[in-house]
Amino acid sequence: MNRGHNRERIFDEDADYKVFLNAVQQACSRHDVAIHGFALMKNHFHLLVTPPTPVAIGKATKAFESKYCYYYNRKHHRIGSIWNGRYHDVPIESGWHWLVCLRYIELNPVRAEIVGDPAAYRWTSYQVHAASSGAHPWLASHPAYETLGASDEERQAVYRAICGAPLGGAELTLMRNRPVVQLAATG
């Protein structure tokens, strides 16, 4: 995750979200970082990824944040970083933890009271996990998600049910008392 400097907006319109996702996709592809989930909010973003090496996430993040910052600065006739600071990473140690991270990320617009239903928010990966939307074919599945069912339909139904309940206090504490970017452990 990273946030706009001074919690300022980093996305103003649909084109901004699209440019950012394109930059993320290209940078992560270049560095073999698998993207599993995302949420883009007006002043921050969340990504759930699996890097092939410890340094890959830093290289990919630098690439997409720099590219998007250049785009945003040109658009708004400004200079300097739009980011609050450097990302932090947290290794994910279990399938349960991975699912908590995915839910935390994809339910962000619901917790922020932007929407009541996560399916109503366009700029997350929720539709891919809950309804098999083909909108983001570059998203990689993860073994923790695959364990939710034997078929796409079963996994989606289970995931929708899991997301139907808000995150519990322990889950929110786990996510909020960590540095701000979550990395998925492989396997």
Image: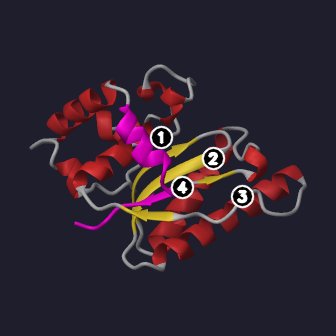
In the displayed structure, does residue 160 sit left or right of residue 12? left
Q: Residue furthest left?
A: 150
Q: Write down the quadrant of residue 153 in the picture.
A: top left
Inter-mark Cα distance, 4 to 3: 13 Å
The mark that comes first in sequence, 1 or 3, is: 3
The mark that comes first in sequence, 4 or 3, is: 3
Front-most of 31 and 108?
108
Q: Mark 4 points at which residue?
A: 180
What mark, if any, has residue 124 been given in the picture?
1
Neighbor class of circle 1 (other Cα within 10 Å; few <14, some 14-19, many 20+) is many
Vertical order, 45 against 153 (above or below): below
Residue at (23, 54) in percent of width and height: 95
The mark that comes first in sequence, 4 or 2, is: 2
Front-most of 185 and 130?
185
**Is residue 185 rendered magenta in the image?**
yes
- Mark closer to the observer (4, 2): 4
Inter-mark Cα distance, 4 to 1: 17 Å
- Quadrant for the N terminus in the image: bottom right
The mark that comes first in sequence, 2 or 3, is: 2
Q: Mark 2 points at which residue?
A: 44
Q: Do the residues labelled 1 and 3 touch (CB within 8 Å)?
A: no
Q: Residue furthest top?
A: 116
* Amino acid type at mark 2: His
Q: Is residue 125 at least partly visible in the picture?
A: no
Residue at (59, 61) in percent of width and height: 23
